[in-house]
Amino acid sequence: MFVTLLFILKDYKLIFAVLTVAIVWGTTFLAIRVAVETIPAWFVAGIRQFFASLIMLVILLSRKEFKWVGWKNLGYQLIFASLMLVVANGMTTVAEESVSSSLASLISACSPILVFLGSVAIGLQKFSIRAMMGVLMCFGGILFIFWDGLKDLANPDYRMGMIFLFCAISGWASGTIFTKKLNIQSGNITLNLFYQFLFAGIVQIIFAFLFSENYNFGNWTLKSISAMLYLAVFGSVAAFFAFHYALTKISPVQVSILAYINTIIAIFLGWLIMNESISFKFILATALIICGVFITNYKPEMFKREKIKS
């Protein structure tokens, strides 16, 4: 499926962008898990986004492209940042203090289902028998997750982690629907990302000082700091830029295929590096969720040649 998508793309910059999103976002779940081992989650999320905004500012100033975007566009960027970065990214980071990176990535893979259901609710998409089958498969996968980890729900930290994860995918889905509903077209991607990262970083750092019980900076290990910097440079700057660039070249439906690759990479790395246990039920849940999301969002144009915009 992924190979087919690459073959239909003739723009090498686009291929690089697609690969960047697929691989880098697949590694971010592991990087978050490593970062929160010694750094409070909101600090990880906030410093990550604030540092990313500084990188974007340097790029904008070097290109002499930094400017005021206007109140209307700023409002769009702040709403997008609140949903996609503060809520979705921030709460995923908080959740990984108590749940594995594999589980976080698998729950996050359910976000396209919420996007679909939300789009149906507001009239952006129509429901179908095929879509219903996909939704049922996805929920079947979620049931297997809870079945496999039912005893873990007795742990209040794990339970709160799961709640944070579902809040995170709701935020991501809401941000996606918001973008689709308003049909917001990206102007200067770097400029938009600067405002998004700056706002999210400031808000999350404020949350860090308000909600972190212990933020003794002396306890932060080099390993966790390195993971946090990786998240800033690659997880935020490189991957988000590549994601937005890809959206200007191919349809959102085609870009959505990357979610399946991200999940597989994240689960594999969690097992390989963090020794996270992967049971048969977990593998079955992964297959059900990925297939369910694919069936729900499948459209013939996924694998058709897309006209490259200039």
Image (cartoon, rainbow, N blue to C red):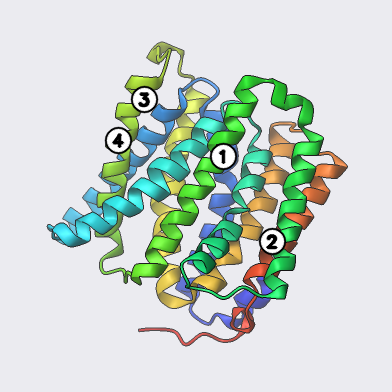
- Residue 135's label in the rendered image is 2
Element on which disc 1 rests: helix
Q: For marks 2 and 1, give the one nearer the viewer.
A: 2
N-terminal-most mark, 2 or 4: 2
Element on which disc 2 rests: helix
Q: Nearer the viewer, residue 1 or 297?
A: 297
Q: How far apart, in angstroms, are the residues tagged by discs 2 and 3? A: 36 Å
Q: For marks 3 and 1, give the one nearer the viewer.
A: 1
Left or right, 122 with respect to 194, comes to: right
State whether residue 179 appears in this view: yes
Which residue corresponds to the image point at 40% horizontal and 12% vertical from the top-left? 216
N-terminal-most mark, 4 or 3: 4
Which residue corresponds to the image point at 25% horizontal and 51% vertical from the top-left? 195
Vertical relation: 212 (above or below) 307: above
Q: Give the amino acid type for the residue marked by disc 3 in the picture.
A: Ala
Q: How far apart, in angstroms, are the residues tagged by discs 3 and 1? A: 18 Å
Q: For marks 2 and 3, give the one nearer the viewer.
A: 2
Q: Which residue is mark 4?
A: 203
Q: Give the amino acid type for the residue marked by disc 2 in the picture.
A: Val
N-terminal-most mark, 3 or 1: 1
Q: In which quadrant is the C terminus drawn?
A: bottom left
Dot 2 crowding, Cα within 10 Å, few <14, some 14–19, many 20+: many
Q: Which residue is mark 3?
A: 208
Q: Position of residue 2 (x, y in %)?
A: 66, 69
Left or right, 155 with respect to 27, comes to: right
